[in-house]
Image (cartoon, helix red, strand yellow):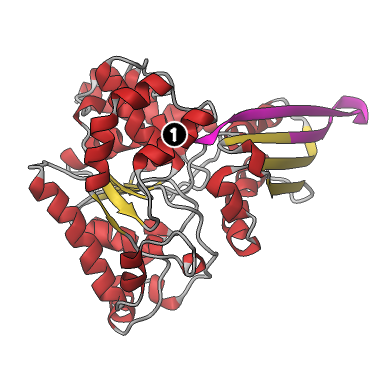
Amino acid sequence: MWIVGARGAVATCVAYGAWGLRAGLLEPIGLATERAPFTRLPLRSPDDLIFGGHEISLGDLSSSASELVRHGVLPMDLVAASAAEAAALDARIRPGALDVADVGRADLDPEVTALCAAHPRSKVERLAADVTAFRVEHGLERVIVVNLASTETWADERESWHDLAAFERALDRGEDFPASCLYARAAFESGSPFVNFTPNRGSSIAALRQLARERNLPHCGNDGKTGETLVKTVLAPMFVARALRVLSWQGYNMLGNRDGAVLSDPIRRESKLRNKDAPLHAILDDENLHTGVGIDFVPSLHDWKTAMDFVHFQGFLGAKMSLQFTWSGSDSALAAPLVIDLVRLADFACARGESGEMAHTACFFKSPIAGGTHDFHAQFARLIEYAERHERA
């Protein structure tokens, strides 16, 4: 697994979680692929995972882990038992590509600043070379590139994104691209499947979807569905099934850590909010529906997030009623097993020659690349059907 954002909170939980599973220190709680029917498929074991990655910040993995220990996310005994693995991963982390909003950060790796000034084509070649070198050095059959970086600034669609030939010409003439698109382009250049767990563009633009099909590589995204939106896509179909009219669905989120700080930037927040409201409108399909989502950075929460939702709905006789819920959890601990699931599924798809959008993984994302329903129950049923079909093959 090659992780973009390799020392972030989610990446840290993924790595230590895999090492804990291998050492028998953890149960596979939260791993859908550790349940039937997936256990009857020849999926790669989490024990087989070897980690490398790109990172833009200075630091080391043990510091990231220590912070998560302090805030009650990672167990201290797991971190202590994984010291050697953490040091080995640190040695395999390479300088990554910058999003425009990260320019000027105090903790930037100086080598990242140098890469920032390079021609976009050179950036892609350097990023791809890092992934290829990782595969060769460790004698790996396959590398899955996973984007766990922070939310980027929102970028509107461009003509050059709609066609692969136009994309390549724009790359050659030095047009600026979101960093996530460069990572996806580099992944495909290195012959690697790509998983985008962020709300960033990644491989979702038409040109890169075309490239994935041409290179016979699977990919999936966008924006991991771990908390409030997960609950929304489970509850909203209930109102539809019971013919209850939802009038308003208002949400409010408080979160800490780096993600919270990043989303305090209004331009970056737009990227996130686009994916949080769209599923409700798609499921409830009512032009009069009012929705709203607020996000505030609360530094003292650290890796913990609290989301409060108010659902105002109308029943028989015109009676107006409400449902209210509060969701509180560690985003990183919720995300980590999903990332491992997606890497196993991407590896499985690639081994079987599948290419293009992994539509069966929609239940993992707020904004699935392949589109389709946002109803979690229907999405998960499609994933089960995919597994059972391959089980019979």
Q: Element under label 1?
A: helix
Residue drawn at x 19%, y 24% as measured from the top left: 42
Q: Give the percent coordinates (x, y) of residue 323.
A: 79, 27
Q: Give the percent coordinates (x, y) of residue 264.
A: 64, 55
Evaluate whether residue 147 shows in this view.
Answer: yes
Q: Mark 1: which amino acid?
A: Ser
Residue drawn at x 37%, y 18% as measured from the top left: 28
Vertical placement of 276 versus 77: above or below?
A: below
Decide: few, some or many residues near mark 1? Use Cα within 10 Å; few <14, some 14-19, many ≥20: some
Q: Which of 97 and 89 is in front in this view?
A: 89
Vertical placement of 376 versus 263: above or below?
A: above
- Rendered-image quadrant of the N terminus: top left
Evaluate whether residue 215 shows in this view.
Answer: no
Q: Which of 147 and 214 is in front in this view?
A: 147
Q: Which of 157 and 382 is in front in this view?
A: 157
Magenta span: predominant SS is strand
- Rendered-image quadrant of the C terminus: top left
Per the image, the residue denoted by label 1 is: 66
Please state if 88 lies on the left or on the right of 336 as rendered.
left
* Residue 69 lies in the magenta-colored region: no
Q: Give the percent coordinates (x, y) of residue 105.
A: 49, 64
Vertical placement of 117 versus 290: above or below?
A: below
Question: Quarter-wise, where is residue 87 in the image?
Answer: top left
* Residue 324 lies in the magenta-colored region: yes
Q: Give the percent coordinates (x, y) of residue 109.
A: 36, 61
Give the magenta range.
Answer: 309-332
Residue drawn at x 15%, y 55% as measured from the top left: 132
